[in-house]
Image: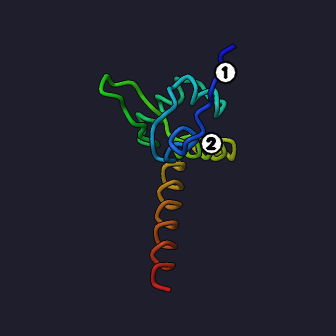
Amino acid sequence: MQESTIDLSPAATATPDADRGVYGISVAAELVGMSEQSLRFYETRDLLLPDRTPGGTRRYSANDLVRLRRIGQLLDAGLNLAGIAMVLHLEAENAQLREEKEGLS
């Protein structure tokens, strides 16, 4: 009887970088509870920019999923897409300013 081995090396058990696109559009849509068409639409409205494979296939990162969930929250709160774009921009700017402030301390 041959034993199967499981690779527990750091490379095999590492989680992908949060910015690295690893999820296809169907998986990303399912994980955030949105339609694939919605994800494509948000991209056309510049609300997110997924990675692309050399063949042009969209690949979504963990950070993209967080952003999509935030878009969903803002839609549920009644904001339109223009308002959502403003909120996301201001939140990113605020996070950057906080990082700069922490770097000065």
Image point (53%, 50%), residue name: 83
The one of 14 and 85 positioned closer to us in this rendering: 14
Q: Residue at x 51, y 47 (%)?
A: 18
Q: Which residue is mark 1?
A: 3
Q: In the image, what residue occupies the spot 59% across and 24% down?
A: 35
Q: Nearer the viewer, residue 16 or 57?
A: 16
Q: Hey, which residue is sitting farthest front in the picture?
A: 1
Q: Is residue 73 above or below residue 42?
A: below
Quadrant of the image containing the N terminus: top right
Of residues 13 and 103, the one drawn nearer to the viewer in this rendering: 13
- Residue 6 drawn at (x, y percent): 62, 30
The image quadrant that residue 75 belongs to is top right
Residue sitting farthest toward the bottom: 105
Residue occupying the far top of the picture:
1
Q: Secondary structure at mark 2?
A: helix
Q: Residues within 10 Å of mark 2 (few under 14, many from 20)?
A: some
Q: Position of residue 46 (x, y in %)?
A: 41, 41
Name the residue: 39% across, 24% down.
Answer: 57
Query: In the rendered view, does 86 fall on the left or right side of 32?
Result: left
Amino acid of disc 1: Glu
Indicate the position of residue 105 as horizontal and vertical percent values.
50, 86
Image location (x, y in percent) of residue 30? 63, 26
Q: Nearer the viewer, mark 2 or mark 1?
A: 1
Q: CA distance from mark 2 to mark 1?
A: 42 Å
Where on the picture, by quarter, is residue 72?
A: top right
Disc number for residue 56 = none
Q: Which residue has dot 2 on it?
A: 69
